[in-house]
Every structure is written in C-alpha cells, then in structure tokens.
Image (tube, rainbow, N blue to C red):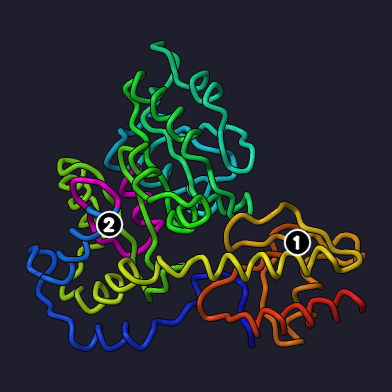
C-alpha cells in the first residue's frame, strides 16, 4: 500500500532507530535527560527563541501555549479553519476556559485589519483578547504558506495592543522550504511557536514549543499538570534531534512530488484541484466524477493507494519521505483508473 493520507504516517529512519537504542538518558522531570536538553537547546537556536520544551504532540504544545498565555474568561483570535479551532476537540474551552473568536482567512491568512478590528476594547461586557493564534503551513487551506509579511503585520498589531501571538507551526519547515527563507523569519513574528517533529520531519513522536525563558518555565509546569512529564525521554528525543537537524533539508523533495501529483490530477477528466498546492498537501475535487470523496477513497484503496476525505467531494493527498517518485507515478495511474470508473 502507498499511504498518502498524511505525513504523520512516516516511519523512523534506520538512523533514528539506532539513535533511540544508544540514547544517553536521565529523568527529564528532574531536568536530567541530556538528550532532551540537547533537543530543546537545538530547537531554540534553530527557531531563534530563548528556550524550548519537548512535548508529546502538537496538540499538547498548542494547548500548553494557550494555558500559559491566557486566563479563564479571555478570548482567543484565530483563523476560522485553523487546527486549534477545528481539530483539537474544543480543548481551549475544556482546559483553558477561553472562548474562540474566528476570523475568515484567504488561504489561511487573516487580514491584519480584521485582526485589529477583532481585538476587544475595554468594556465590562467583553472578554479580554488573551492571545492571537496563527497557523503555518495552514492545513485546511491545503498546506498554504502564510506569508512572512502577513505574519509581521499581525504581530506588529498584536504588540501595539499588548496581545501575545502563538504560531501553530506544525509544518513550519515546509513553509520555510517553499518560501526559500530561514525558519527564523517566520518565528520572529511570534511570541511562541510550536513545531511538530513527527510530520514531514519524520520522527516517531513529539513536538517542540519555544519562546522566552519565562514562558517555558510556566509551560513546563502546565506540561506536568497535563500528564506530559516524561522520565527517560531521551529515547524519543534522539530521533527528534535527527529530524530537526537533518530531515528539514529534504522537504523540497516532498514538495516536488506534490507538484508532480497535482499536475497529473489536474489533467484527469472530471477531477480538479481545490487549490494549487504550495507545499506537500494536495486537495482534489472529485465532484466532476459524480462520486463522493468517501466512494473515491474506498475505490482508490482497493487499488493500493490510501488517501483521506477532506469534505463531501474533496480528497486529500500528502507527500512525505516514505513515498518516492516511482510510487507517486503508481498513485497517479491508480487515481486515473478510479476516475475512469
């Protein structure tokens, strides 16, 4: 089977497996795991932040950021189809006691003026604006890259109004590869940032949140409260360190394969792209084939290709390092065959 559901399905490389076996470990709750410390220090340096914290998942990282930045009763501003709003089980309400105020975006990017207008003025009837959250790349916008200039404009507005900015950068290195800029150019327009090690970077587990030292100190306590305190965590930090230092440089291959796949889909009668891909996510519309996405995905799986539904007629394909160019060609043949049916 060729699995194009998500870049979360990647398997750790042989180098990662060996690193897990030989990792130097200690009790991370006591701050004594040298491999975890190396991962956190490396991540902070790469992202241009003062400190970083290793967490179990991207969702946990985002929720720790909200819990650290906000107080119960405050309001969170974020794009209307962002991951924090759409895919995190209402955790900001359940855990942090904050409400969300969503803002429509264009390819995942909010208009800075809309963000400014949404920041609450001082009024006894209103919640305080506690945090602004951005997402880059933007998943439901088809892996779109939110431009640095857009982030900079929003960050300037936030600073002027004394509101912190958190970036859900689960696929931030994909954004940097596509834009041809250092990842720090995105991260510097935020107070805090979360990155996933287990998506395109290929580690088996884990994410990083980064910010200033005071934020990370408080975030570490929230991680403990959420049951995220880990003991000899170096065995999972070791592959994360390889992911962070070596795997980010090959993301262009995934994005090249995505372009090959997207161009082929666009040429198949009855199929069209929901939007032009910028990174490693392709969203195809099968409405012109007179079938639902569920039926298309089921038939495609019978041909040995696993994909995912992304709406009633939308199908999502995600390229990653476990799928090479030859497999992309096989996927194209299978997609065309299902479309002919």
Q: Position of residue 33 (x, y in %)?
A: 11, 70
**Percent x, y of residue 278:** 61, 54
The residue drawn where x is 67% and y is 69% is 308
Residue, x 31% and y 49% (percent of image)? 64
Query: Label 2 crowding class (10 Å Cα cut-off): few <14, some 14-19, many 20+?
Result: few
Is 323 covered by the magenta stretch?
no
Q: Relative to residue 287, is residue 121 drawn left or right? A: left
Q: Which mark is residue 87?
A: none
Q: Depth check: give the residue in front, 115 or 181.
A: 181
Q: Is residue 272 above or below residue 335?
A: above
Mark 1 nearby-residue class (10 Å; few <14, some 14–19, many ≥20): many
Quadrant of residue 66 within the rendered picture: top left
**Residue 196 sits in which quadrant?**
bottom left
Q: Nearer the viewer, residue 189 or 288?
A: 189
Residue for badge 1: 284
In this rendering, the answer to whether 51 lies above or below 214 is below
Which badge, 2 or 1, comes first in the chain's sequence? 2
Q: Is 228 left or right of 339, judged from the image as shown?
A: left
Examine the rendered structure and indicate whether residue 8 appears above or below residue 323.
above
Rendered location of residue 336, percent (x, y): 84, 77
Q: Nearer the viewer, mark 2 or mark 1?
A: 1
Outermost front residue: 180
Which label number is shown at residue 226? 2
Q: How many marks?
A: 2
Give the farthest residue toward the top: 123
* Quadrant in which the C terminus appears: bottom right
- Could you say which quadrant of the image residue 228 lies in? bottom left
Spot occupied by residue 212 in the image (x, y as percentages of width and height): 20, 42
At 44% across and 82% down in the image, what residue appears? 11
Secondary structure state at the residue bearing disc 1: strand
The magenta-colored residue range is 47-66
Q: Secondary structure at mark 2?
A: loop
């Amino acid at each position: 089977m060729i699995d194009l559901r998500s870049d979360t399905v990647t398997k750790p490389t042989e180098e990662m497996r060996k690193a897990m076996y030989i990792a130097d470990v200690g009790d991370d709750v006591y701050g004594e795991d040298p491999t975890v410390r190396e991962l956190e220090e490396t991540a902070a340096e790469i992202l241009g932040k003062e400190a970083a914290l290793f967490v179990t998942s991207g969702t946990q990282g985002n929720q720790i950021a909200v819990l650290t930045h906000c107080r119960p009763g405050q309001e969170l501003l974020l794009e209307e189809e962002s991951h924090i709003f759409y895919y995190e089980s209402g955790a900001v309400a359940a855990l942090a006691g904050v409400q969300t105020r969503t803002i429509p975006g264009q390819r995942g990017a909010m208009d800075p003026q809309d963000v400014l207008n949404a920041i609450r003025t001082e009024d006894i009837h209103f919640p305080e604006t506690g945090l602004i959250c951005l997402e880059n790349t933007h998943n439901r916008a088809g892996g779109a890259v939110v431009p640095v200039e857009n982030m900079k404009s929003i960050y300037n507005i936030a600073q002027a109004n004394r509101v912190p900015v958190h970036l859900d950068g689960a696929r931030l290195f994909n954004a940097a590869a596509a834009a041809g800029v250092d990842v720090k150019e995105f991260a510097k327009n935020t107070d805090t940032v979360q990155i996933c090690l287990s998506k395109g970077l290929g580690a088996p587990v884990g994410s990083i949140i980064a910010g200033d030292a005071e934020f990370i100190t408080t975030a570490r306590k929230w991680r403990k409260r959420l049951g995220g305190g880990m003991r000899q965590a170096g065995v999972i930090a070791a592959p994360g360190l390889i992911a962070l230092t070596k795997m980010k440089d090959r993301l262009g291959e995934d994005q090249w394969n995505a372009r090959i796949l997207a161009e082929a889909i666009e040429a198949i009668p009855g199929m069209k792209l929901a939007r032009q891909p910028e990174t490693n996510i392709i969203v195809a519309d099968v409405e012109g084939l007179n079938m639902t996405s569920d039926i298309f995905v089921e038939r495609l799986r019978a041909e040995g290709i696993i994909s995912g539904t992304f709406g009633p007629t939308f199908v999502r394909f995600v390229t990653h390092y476990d799928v090479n160019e030859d497999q992309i060609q096989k996927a194209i043949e299978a997609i065309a065959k299902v479309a002919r049916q």
